Image (cartoon, grey):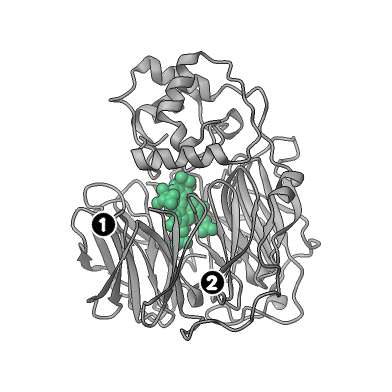
Amino acid sequence: MVRPSRGRGLLAVALLVSLPVVAGEAPRESADSQALYQTHCASCHGIDRLGGMGPALLPGNLSRLKQDEAIAVIREGRPATQMMGFEDVLSSAESEALAKWIYTPPDTPPTWNMADIKQSQVVMHPFGSLPDEPTFDADPMNLFLVVETGDHHVSLLDGDTFDRIDRFPSRYALHGGPKYTPDGRYVFFGSRDGWISKYDIYNQEMVAEVRAGINMRNIAVSGDGRYVMAANYLPHTLVLFDAHNLDPMKAYPVSDASGATSRVSAVYAAPPRGSFIAALKDIKEVWEIPWPVPTSPVVSTGHMKEPIEALRSHDTPNFDVRRITVPDYLDDFFFDPEYRHLIGAARGGQGAMVIDLDSGDNVADLPLAGMPHLGSGVSWMLDGRRVMAIPHLTKGAVSIIDMSDWSLIKTLETAGPGFFMRSHENSPYAWVDVFFGPNHDKVHVIDKQSLEIVETLTPAPGKVAAHVEFDRDGEKLLLSIWDRDGAVIVYDAKTLKELQRIPMDKPSGKYNVWNKTQYEEGTSH
Ligand code: DHE
């Protein structure tokens, strides 16, 4: 329920109208609440409450939010999301009517099953049908993809010259990082409305698409590039695909032993374990799903020194679910470089927990009030120990934790809550934005050894400056000016001098092929 800006609202409605979604819902509540919903909420949450830029608003997706809490969210907004408060637009009675309406089940529950998934699949260029040589001279392992959320496009940049090799349309509202195959040739994008798009970087062609769900969180690609797993909010499923042509292989209904179902918070690939790891939003479990071990190791560089097959630490059959019971719901999580530990947090909680993925034990609790944004954490070596740093979504701080004993080393004060952190093994600095509040145009540069802020940049006064990604060698980096009249700024990573400004339409995330495929310690996975 974001206050609709005219452009975004119209685009969202147009798109959602054209989606092949089910529902056929005949609302039971008063015409007034439906009209209010269509006026204030539909542009982001979908005309049928099935989700869009915002999540689906159906009882099955609101199980962790009480109705009076929903009224407060409608009135005051929700921290760390695009959801603004409607206090000055809606009366108390209208907010209550709206809350009641979103907890009313639709007459026909929305479904998206294997048959729907199969029917949605489009293969434009079957696997193996396009040339195997890149059409460009740029280093194929030092390319950047930049997601431009303004007009829903993606730019492909040469990571040495920053020339634009391609700019192509994406699905509406991509969310989460695109995922590359380990050779860097293909990339998979996930959209909030469930679409997975596979793009051939060498040939600059979209090669296959499929719709995994109605409201999706993110996707993960196996360490050998052979499988894609999609995590859904609606329906409550994980869906496995063959990466070649995005053929659906298996849909996992996500539920516990009692039959209670759950949204999936997110799924990640853990190459050293040879498995996908999914955290669940409504049941207290983490799921591990192994993929078949390849005959030769495909990830053996960077800080992940061991070949895959040596590290598989469990004997669950391929594609079966290993359930790990955890003390709380997990909305957000991070891994140590070996993928031995998962560090996870519930959004409303006051801390994070450390789960040993082999034993399933909760081995430590971290005192991290203020909504730690674990998903954007980075790690590095400090005095012979590995440390991790994470921003907080509701307080101006970066927490730095010693990963050898899980103690909090330092809480660094920042100019406001941050969303994304980034670094690179070759850089002395870690970068954190100040995404929320009056200082959203500032970015801090932190010295990784002194743990002090050494520079605060304001590259475009008044405009959000956020999300950094380094090049392959950690010598230059890109920062987004998150605005329709925005840009990607190229900085020298040592001198912190601006080198170049490339105009872009609300650029959000940027993703370097090398850093992503090598699971570089300073970037998101
Ligand atoms: Fe994200 C990544 C969850 C809101 C932009 N975000 C992720 C991931 C998760 C997540 C689990 C990791 C997935 C991956 O990369 O595979 N995001 C959430 C939320 O729960 C939250 C707070 C509420 C929600 O709306 O879902 C949220 N995210 C946002 C935004 O409002 C942002 C700023 C704008 C947008 O596009 O929606 C946003 N999220 C991003 C970006 C990434 C991301 C750009 C990839 C970061 C990266 O560097 O990998």
The image position of residue 283, as x and y in percent, is 63, 41
Secondary structure type for disc 1: loop
Q: Which quadrant of the rendered structure holds the N terminus?
A: top left
Dot in front, 2 or 1:
2
Depicted 215 relative to depicted 57: above or below: below
Q: In this rendering, does residue 442 appear at all?
A: yes
The residue closer to the viewer here, 231 or 414, is 231
Depicted 425 relative to depicted 479: above or below: below
Secondary structure type for disc 2: loop
Say which residue label 1 marks. Answer: 414
The answer to whether the residue labelled 2 contacts the one labelled 1, judged by CB atoms less than 8 Å apart, is: no
The disc labelled 1 sits on which kind of residue?
Answer: Thr
Residue at point 21%, 48% (across, down): 438
Rendered image quadrant of residue 19: top right
Say which residue label 2 marks. Answer: 204
How packed is label 2: few (under 14 Cα within 10 Å), some, or many (20 or more)?
some
Residue at point 66%, 41% (across, down): 236
Q: In this rendering, does residue 365 appear at all?
A: no
The image position of residue 287, as x and y in percent, is 68, 53
| Real-space CA distance between mark 2 and mark 1, rounded to the nearest whole angstrom | 40 Å
Rendered image quadrant of residue 455: bottom left
Q: Which mark is residue 340?
A: none
Tell me: 62 left or right of 389: right
